[in-house]
Amino acid sequence: MSDSPPDSEKSRLDFIREIVDADLKSGKHATIVTRFPPEPNGYLHIGHAKSICLNFGIAREFGGRCHLRFDDTNPSKEEQEYVDSIQEDIRWLGFDWGENRFFASDYFDQLYEWAVFLIKEGKAYVDDQTAEEIRQTRGTLTEPGTPSPHRDRSVEENLALFERMRAGEFADGERVLRARIDMAHANVNLRDPVLYRILRAHHHRTGDKWLLYPMYDFAHGQSDAIEGITHSICTLEFENHRPLYDWFIENLPVPARPRQIEFSRLNLNFTVMSKRKLLQLVKDGHVSGWDDPRMPTISGLRRRGYPAEAIRNFCGTIGVTKFNSTNDVALLENAVRDVLNRASARRMAVLDPLKVVVTNYPEDQIEEMEVANNPNDETAGARSVPFCRELYIEREDFLEDPPKGFFRLFPGGEVRFRSAYFIRCDEAVRDDAGEIVELRCTYDPETRGGQNPPDGRKVKGTIHWVSARHAIDAETRLYDRLFSVEDPDGGEGDFLDHLNPESLLVRRGCKLEPSLAESKAGEPIQFERLGYFCVDARDSTPETPVFNRTVGLRDSWAKQKTGK
RNA sequence: UGCCUCGUGGUGUAACGGUAGCACAACAGAUUCUGACUCUGUUUGUUAAGGUUCGAAUCCUUACGAGGCAGCCA
């Protein structure tokens, strides 16, 4: 992980780091405390990764700390399963909250006391109106709201009522506690926002202790204050809530004054990011689960083979600003390729096998060819790959009638079989249906190891191969973008209408070089000339290995073929 | 037509009154035992109009455009 101190990149500081930097230099804060505050009601996605990298990153760079705080103020939506997955994902991304794991529910007692404090100050009241009545009297964006008939209740009455709310004397929704601010405020959030609602739901942490729960606005800033958070970084949609955030901080005897700063959330094209939509994809079975490799979830990306380092790098390059933007997934994929190119061992695998018989190669001979594990990295060493008379090559590496510029095999043509021999195709054998089932070829013994022959003959193409006698069978899963349009949310119609029917292509009967039998989930591998792959952590078995394609190699030939 | 926020190449971002730069993408070429990687080069931009200034992406005004907000969600 690159944790270059901020001073070395002064000109590169984003606006939030600039604020943090200034607050440190001015002495406003001696140490920085940030927090990542997920609601445990879903899995983390790449958008959260941006926030995680920001919050934990700032803490690390500026010598502060970052808390993990679960925002669990709504027991009807939250589950332990999500708490677990969130923690796993953050750790996997490479961040550590140390001892600083908290829950907003840790502060329910304190929050309740503060609610009472507000009542005593005449700044909060119990409202008997129904949710519908409250909504209707809130006014509109252009018209002021009208005060609740209960707005001017006495402190004593409010105190008694609030206590009865806690004691369970009212049904869910029968009473709420509201702040007493300004029903005509231009910012609707300040029109006497609800602070507490009655909810008879079992809470994953506090069990059945509480019947009433604080709203986000009443919990978040105060939780920040309790924990001594100096910079409470959140996304743009909370901008309108900042005046309310500050109102609570100013009107409550909180131990600190945290500052909320908003930045633009991450958007990626060709996918959706809202929890609701991701949940729908899972629930409706459009994907196999939260960790489906096509999902933008952290668990999905991990299973797909995206390295944590690549995700971190990506988050570092997209920047932090206040304008809404949509990032090109190509940038993410570039970050993935960049890491994988350095980290992956090269292997040979044939996804769509076409048999090759080397007619002049001795029937019973087997040679072990030494093949570099990574031509760009000598320290990666080499392995041996068996070569014999019967081989498999990629079906698309042979064309009977090649277009100009085709470097691969064709009748009468010669190519290099990677690290093996120069091989010439003599004949394509067809079955009764006319399909090519086998290539009859001859090799040049003087090119062993793939070396150029003494006669100076050269060859334009090098292709990968696998020994038919030694190959192991496997399934590969080739992924493409989940949606076929850039902005599945935009335009008319349901986002599901834009699902890419070819987002998953399963290939069985793939032929892999024998050394691949030992690869483990999470280990990055490049199938030469094809892309980066990894063993699927969920479905792969020793009997039938399953490999996920993390991302393909750049393919300028394919681009050329499809007409630019 | 209320309030808040924001407008820089195709995308994302930098320039903090003084040469509009970087990454990705695209394109062209070099190299190559991966049509990969790497390297070189090219195309494309300050929403508009005024104003301040020797000088404006930057400051001011207006217009235009984008996003957010009317949950007892977060």
Image: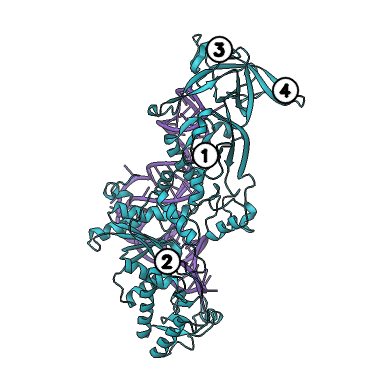
Chain colours: A cyan, B purple
- Front in this rendered view, residue B53 or B9: B9
Q: CA distance from mark 2 to mark 1?
A: 43 Å
Comparing labels 1 and 3, the label whose residue is closer to the camera = 1
**Residue A238 is drawn in which quadrant?**
bottom left
Chain of the residue that carries numbered disc 1 in the rendered image? A
Could you confirm whether marks 2 and 3 are on the same chain? yes
Instruction: Write the residue at 59% across / 55% down.
Output: A281
Could you confirm whether marks 2 and 1 are on the same chain? yes
> Residue A348: horizontal and vertical position, in percent?
53, 28
Residue A535, numbered label? 1
In the rendered view of the protein, which quadrant contains the C terminus of chain A?
Answer: top right
Q: CA distance from mark 2 to mark 3?
A: 71 Å
The residue labelled by disc 4 is A430
Instruction: Write the residue at 55% across / 80% down.
Output: A136
Say what secondary structure mark 4 lies in: strand
Residue A320 visible in this rendered orientation of the protein: no
Say what secondary structure mark 2 lies in: helix
- Front in this rendered view, residue A76 or A346: A76
Kindly identify the amino acid type of the residue bearing the numbered disc 3: Asp
Is residue A352 positioned above or below A195 on the image? above
The residue labelled by disc 2 is A239
Kindly identify the amino acid type of the residue bearing the numbered disc 2: Glu
Sequence-first disc among 1 and 4: 4
Comparing labels 2 and 4, the label whose residue is closer to the camera = 4
State left or right for residue A275 relative to residue A338.
right
> Residue A109: horizontal and vertical position, in percent?
37, 75
The residue labelled by disc 3 is A444
State left or right for residue A162 relative to residue A350.
left
